[in-house]
Image (spheres, grey):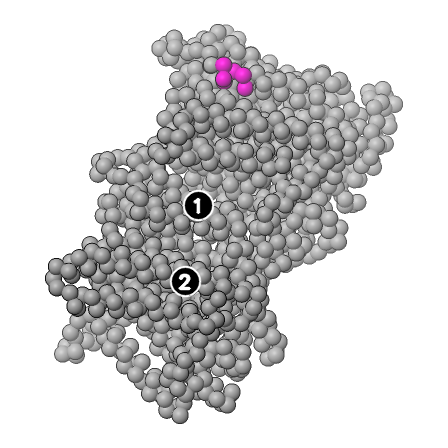
């Protein structure tokens, strides 16, 4: 019952709000009531989610609930069902907590919107789909949630339906995600072909029997598990905006800011990471694909961070930052540190939602101005937002004291990832791990730079925009500040409180929801080799807190590796801060750079980054253009010239030529003849059959 | 419940009787009464077709889905020589009967406003059309099937030719030309089968049950017969490259005509493949399966891309229908449970979704009398309820999980994947392109700023339109979240079909 409430409350809220949007419904439920209902439903779900995390994560009361029969065709069986284990419970907490706060925040942010019931309906509907995704016990229901969140995302990106850019962005998001979904769908089909089932428990428990299966796919003879892993990852790349399928995420910022915080930062975009962790049993047995994931994740972390360095739109900076942080999560999963990936997902949800909501607060204060070039020095107007944003920035840049358990959320999770990559590389378990480690360091430097640049350009220095707007700028109302406060709490505490749960005590907390069982896999090798390393560092007195068990290595590792590895992330973070400070706070600061670029047009590198490596342009010139062109060719040449030309039109002109000669018979339309012919034919048949029959 | 009643005859011929009643009444009434009659004709037709739907529903409840053979079988002497009037339904055909009887009253309801002239004649044509459609699905005699199957075209010609748009003549003749070729070939094949049955079975017959279960046609001959049947079914589906009649027919047809065309007539070909090609010519079906696969995949990709470039709403949806039928043919020729069930599911689901989409087009066409995409834009502001319905059906068309469209697509793709990943990959590309054209259409018509001043006074849906679209919307979702409603009924018949198919292949050694 607990889980039914958690999952269906948002759906009911969405339906009520949707009804309230109609003329008929407005008489029964007014706007206020509708907002109150959806928000309180979400808070209920959120509170119960924390209860469930305690129940599942600490008391180990994992459950599997079957709700309804769904597809039952031959051997293909997929139910509507909830699988609640620690992995799911963590996601429940993330999704519902952020969603509840975003609902509340939207009271203020959307206060002058004309279609509030519609907005709240979409938000709640999104939450429902996301919950269906994370609670699924089979691949097909996961796909349901997966595409469902895509729909909600589409609706919310295009929420300002009059704006052409918003409409274009929403379609781009849906279609790009569909490209990924094709991979996911093929992955699910391969799962069914190989395992004869789409049920998680059945599939994951028969990995070992199938580890040597080969499969012929598109004329290639492939390792079945590698193929499944790769196809599922294509889906993850779409949803989580990894390089080459990332293009939709920055454009998705066309949606209202609360949407960006909920969907395009904290929850939906992390679905890809969740998928890989959920299917960890498969990835564990697919080292080649895992290596590929590491490489793609690392590259995205770098690429997106580089673009974020120069963007001027406050939301786009954070959007690219999200893309980059998702890259971190993927390379963590790629090196087998699924727990570190989930931990970063968890902490990131808090501080990234916080950053977005702060940006929203700024935009709200500035009358929908998003260009940081027209901001500056507004901290006095929005002091609470300023402080919250600094907290978020300290969290994302990973500030903390190495070797201790003191620090902001990102300090724990990001460092866990970087160190996991280092160790996986150091023992030679994964070729791309060392690459990922160094990229992780470089990206951390850039993260610190663009995050502080955002703060300095927005809040510090001199105001550069319209004086009118500045005069009217004001701190946001309480219903927006409360979510900021609670999320700040998360950004400060999430790491400290949950570090030992997520990373240490691995088997205990995760309790089998992250599965690793292939004895040959790099993670196992890592764990064996690393015990030695840990012994040494323990002797050196850095950390004497040893954990045993399969995953003890990760915990030991983080505290048991060369000290420079522990120091590096913090050092680059501080360097990033210093660089940003020197560039944007000293002297004239931001104004000088803006003027410089306006006058000189910026360096080639600057423009390359500003234009996002020209990837959108490349897609526009190749794929988009060609799809249109080919469509026209098929239509105007294929259908009209060839098929119709040689087919009906050709025949008819031939007939009319003949019938001109036989003009006496040419009395009218062709189908007049048709009836006569049909009747004649029918008569002949009857005669023929009569004679044959008798 | 119905053992002792000729229930199938009733369901089939009540609409025809209704049509005769209407004609008879015009003959006996004076001018004043005729006007009155013309006004009331839709109501009469609505009552009749609703009664038929009710009967079909009762029939479905009474149907025993655990049995594999035909049920409610009726046999009456007809032409003699083994050609009898035989009706019956199995788990496959009963659902098509239900679909037909469900869509017809909705079409009649929609026509009351949208048809501007010769109302009574329109209703007569429609009721006759219903009889012929039902007859096609319940016929258990090859000749009887052929008669219904071909005769369906006559009222459809008339509906397009009389109540159609500007280019109706071109459209109906194109429609005719395509179907003529297939019909003649199929007829020749039927005649061959009939005479062969005397040789093979010792007794000439066109009894479908007997032919399916007992007739063994030599492999080489199967190919020719298969191709002859294929010519007819492929045009009806329509499969690429014999699909070009469909967009023209849709564009010219009145709303109700489009709905029936997309909802039911396109399913005749698929039903034919299931009922005849797979059962009578199993070896040839297996041999030609790759051909079907490639034609299906081409249809899916090719027509989806064309759909994206259309300026006419109806043409866009018509092309998307061809793409969706590609999933059907692909599924049927996988010869496995998921593929076949998926193919049937896709047909039923497409019947509901495309029917609903054409109704949606009708709603704005009735108001503005144009189907130009560029004429519209920003409708969501004036027509929010309409926008919501249209969104649901658009998403169903795109195959979003939770709608019936998803079930059909994923099942056929799972079926195809077991045969060849290439085919599944090709079909999956359709998932992307369907999103491209469907969202493009939605954006241009519903979203955006309303610029056209003609749209200032456009009204949201009225009660009649709500009555039509609400059941379609509910079914789209219901079948999306509980597909067992359908798959349980078809399961045994499909299993039986597959077993017979495999046995036949095994017997003849490929």
Asked whether disc 2 touches disc 1, contact meaning CB atoms under 8 Å apart, the reply is: no
So how many labels did they put on this image? 2
Examine the structure image and report whether residue A476 is included in the region drawn in magenta: no
Which quarter of the image is occupied by the N terminus of chain A?
A: top right
Q: Single out the residue that lies furthest toward the right.
A: A539
Q: Position of residue B37 (x, y in %)?
A: 19, 59
Which secondary structure class fits the magenta region best?
A: helix
The chain containing the residue under callout 1 comes to: B
Q: Chain of mark 2?
A: B
> Can you give x and y, in whole percent of width and height, for residue A565 in the image?
73, 24
Above or below, A239 against B145 in this view is: above
Q: Which residue is mark 1?
A: B395
Location of residue A572 (image quadrant)? top right
Whether residue B166 is visible: no
Residue that badge 2 annotates: B55
Residues rendered magenta in the picture? A478-483
Q: In x, y percent, where is residue B380?
A: 33, 37
Same chain assignment for discs 2 and 1: yes
Q: Can you say whether B509 is above or below B178 in the image?
A: below
Tell me the crowding category of disc 1: few under 14, some 14 to 19, or many 20 or more residues within 10 angstroms, Cα based: many
């Amino acid at each position: 019952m607990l889980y039914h409430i958690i999952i269906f409350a948002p759906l009911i809220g969405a339906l009520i709000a949707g009804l309230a949007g109609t003329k008929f419904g407005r008489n029964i439920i007014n706007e206020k009531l509708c907002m109150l209902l959806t928000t309180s439903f979400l808070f209920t779900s959120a509170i119960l989610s924390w209860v469930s995390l305690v129940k599942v994560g600490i008391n180990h009361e994992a459950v599997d609930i079957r709700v309804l029969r769904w597809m039952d065709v031959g051997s293909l069986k997929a139910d509507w069902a909830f699988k609640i284990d620690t992995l799911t419970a963590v996601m429940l907490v993330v999704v519902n907590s952020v969603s509840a706060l975003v609902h509340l925040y939207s009271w203020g942010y959307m206060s002058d919107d004309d279609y509030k019931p519609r907005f709240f309906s979409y938000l709640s509907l999104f939450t429902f789909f996301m919950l269906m995704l994370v609670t699924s016990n089979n691949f097909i229901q996961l796909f349901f949630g997966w595409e469902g969140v895509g729909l909600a995302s589409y609706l919310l990106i295009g929420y300002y339906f009059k704006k052409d850019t918003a409409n274009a962005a929403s379609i781009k998001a849906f279609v790009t995600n569909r490209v990924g979904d094709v991979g996911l769908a093929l992955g699910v089909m391969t799962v069914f072909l190989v395992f004869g089932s789409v049920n998680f428990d059945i599939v994951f428990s028969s990995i070992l029997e199938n580890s040597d299966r080969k499969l012929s796919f598109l004329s290639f003879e492939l390792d079945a598990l590698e193929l499944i892993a790769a196809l599922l990852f294509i889906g993850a790349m779409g949803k989580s905006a990894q390089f080459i399928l990332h293009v939709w995420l920055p454009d998705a910022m066309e949606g209202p800011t609360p949407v960006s915080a909920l969907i395009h930062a904290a929850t939906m975009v992390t679905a890809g990471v969740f998928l890989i962790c959920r299917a960890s049993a498969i990835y564990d047995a697919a080292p080649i694909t895992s290596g590929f994931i590491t490489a793609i994740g690392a590259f995205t972390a770098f690429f997106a961070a580089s673009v974020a360095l120069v963007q001027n739109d406050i939301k786009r900076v954070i959007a690219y930052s999200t893309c980059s942080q998702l890259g971190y999560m993927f390379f963590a999963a790629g090196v087998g540190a699924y727990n570190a990936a989930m931990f970063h997902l968890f902490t990131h949800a808090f501080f990234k939602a916080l950053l977005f909501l702060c940006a929203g607060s700024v935009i709200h204060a500035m009358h929908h101005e998003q260009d940081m070039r027209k901001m500056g020095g507004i901290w006095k107007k929005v002091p609470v937002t300023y402080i919250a944003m600094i907290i978020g920035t300290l969290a994302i840049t990973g500030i903390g004291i190495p070797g201790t358990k003191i620090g902001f959320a990102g300090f724990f999770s990001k460092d866990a990832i970087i160190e996991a990559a280092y160790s996986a590389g150091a023992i030679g378990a994964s070729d791309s791990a060392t690459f990922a480690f160094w990229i992780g360091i470089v990206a951390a430097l850039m993260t610190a730079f663009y995050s502080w640049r955002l703060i300095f350009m927005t809040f510090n220095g001199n105001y550069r925009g319209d004086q009118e707007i500045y005069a009217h700028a004001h701190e946001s109302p309480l219903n927006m500040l409360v979510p900021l406060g609670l999320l700040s709490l998360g950004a400060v505490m999430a790491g400290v409180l949950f570090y030992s749960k997520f990373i240490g005590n691995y088997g205990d907390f995760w309790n089998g929801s992250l599965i690793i069982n292939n004895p040959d896999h790099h993670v196992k090798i890592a764990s064996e080799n690393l015990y030695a390393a840990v012994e040494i560092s323990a002797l050196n007195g850095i950390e004497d807190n040893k954990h045993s068990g399969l995953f003890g290595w990760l915990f030991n590792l983080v505290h048991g590796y060369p000290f420079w590895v522990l120091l590096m992330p913090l050092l680059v973070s501080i360097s990033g801060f210093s660089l940003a400070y020197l560039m944007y706070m000293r002297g004239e600061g931001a104004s000088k750079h803006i003027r410089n670029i306006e006058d000189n047009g910026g360096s080639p590198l600057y423009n390359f980054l500003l234009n996002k490596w020209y990837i959108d342009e490349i897609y526009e010139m190749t794929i988009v253009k060609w799809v249109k062109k080919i469509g026209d060719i098929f239509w105007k040449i294929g259908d009209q010239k060839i098929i119709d030309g040689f087919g009906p039109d050709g025949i008819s002109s031939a007939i009319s030529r003949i019938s001109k000669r036989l003009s006496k018979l040419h009395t009218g339309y062709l189908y007049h003849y048709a009836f006569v012919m049909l009747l004649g034919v029918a008569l002949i048949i009857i005669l023929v059959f009569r004679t044959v029959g008798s | 419940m119905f053992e002792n009643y000729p229930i199938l005859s009733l369901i089939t011929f009540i609409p025809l009787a209704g049509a005769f009643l209407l004609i008879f009444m015009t003959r006996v009434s004076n001018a004043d009464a005729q006007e009155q009659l013309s006004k009331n004709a839709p109501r009469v037709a609505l009552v009749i077709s609703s009664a038929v739907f009710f009967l079909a529903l009762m029939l479905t409840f009474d149907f025993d889905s655990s049995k594999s053979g035909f049920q409610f079988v009726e046999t009456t002497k007809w032409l003699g020589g083994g050609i009898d009037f035989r009706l019956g339904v199995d788990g496959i055909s009963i659902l098509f009967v239900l679909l037909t009887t469900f869509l017809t009253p909705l079409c009649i309801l929609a026509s009351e406003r949208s048809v501007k002239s010769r109302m009574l004649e329109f209703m007569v044509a429609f009721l006759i059309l219903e009889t012929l459609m039902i007859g096609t699905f319940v016929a258990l005699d090859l000749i009887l099937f052929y008669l219904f199957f071909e005769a369906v075209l006559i009222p459809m010609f008339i509906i397009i030719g009389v109540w159609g748009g500007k280019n109706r003549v071109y459209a109906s003749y194109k429609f005719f030309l395509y179907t003529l070729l297939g019909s003649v070939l199929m007829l020749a094949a039927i005649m061959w089968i009939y005479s062969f049955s005397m040789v093979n079975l010792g007794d000439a017959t066109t009894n479908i049950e007997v032919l399916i279960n007992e007739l063994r046609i030599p492999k080489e001959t199967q190919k020719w017969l298969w191709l002859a049947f294929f010519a007819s079914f492929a045009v009806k589906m329509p499969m690429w490259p014999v699909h070009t009649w469909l967009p023209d027919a849709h564009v010219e047809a009145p709303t109700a005509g489009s709905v029936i065309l997309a909802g039911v007539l396109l399913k005749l070909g698929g039903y034919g493949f299931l009922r005849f090609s797979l059962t009578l010519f199993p070896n040839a079906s297996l041999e030609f399966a790759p051909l079907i696969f490639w034609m299906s995949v081409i249809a899916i990709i090719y027509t989806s891309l064309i759909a994206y470039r259309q300026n006419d709403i109806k043409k866009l949806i018509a092309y998307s229908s061809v793409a969706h039928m590609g999933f059907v043919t692909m599924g049927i020729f996988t010869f496995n449970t998921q593929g076949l069930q998926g193919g049937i599911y896709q047909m039923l689901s497409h019947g509901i979704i495309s029917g609903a989409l054409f109704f949606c087009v009708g709603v704005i066409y009735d108001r503005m009398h144009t189907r130009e995409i560029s004429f519209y834009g920003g409708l969501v502001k004036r027509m929010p309820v309409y926008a919501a319905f249209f969104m649901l059906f658009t998403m169903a068309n795109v195959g979003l999980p939770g709608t019936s469209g998803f079930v059909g697509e994923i099942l056929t793709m799972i079926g195809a994947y077991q045969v060849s990943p290439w085919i599944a990959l090709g079909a999956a590309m359709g998932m992307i392109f369907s999103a491209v054209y469907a969202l493009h259409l939605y954006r241009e018509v519903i979203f955006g700023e309303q610029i056209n001043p003609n749209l200032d006074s456009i009204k949201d849906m009225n009660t009649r339109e709500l009555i039509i679209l609400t059941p379609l919307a509910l079914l789209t979702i219901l079948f999306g979240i509980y597909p067992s409603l359908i798959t349980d009924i078809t399961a045994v018949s499909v299993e039986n079909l597959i077993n017979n198919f495999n046995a036949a292949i095994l017997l003849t050694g490929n």
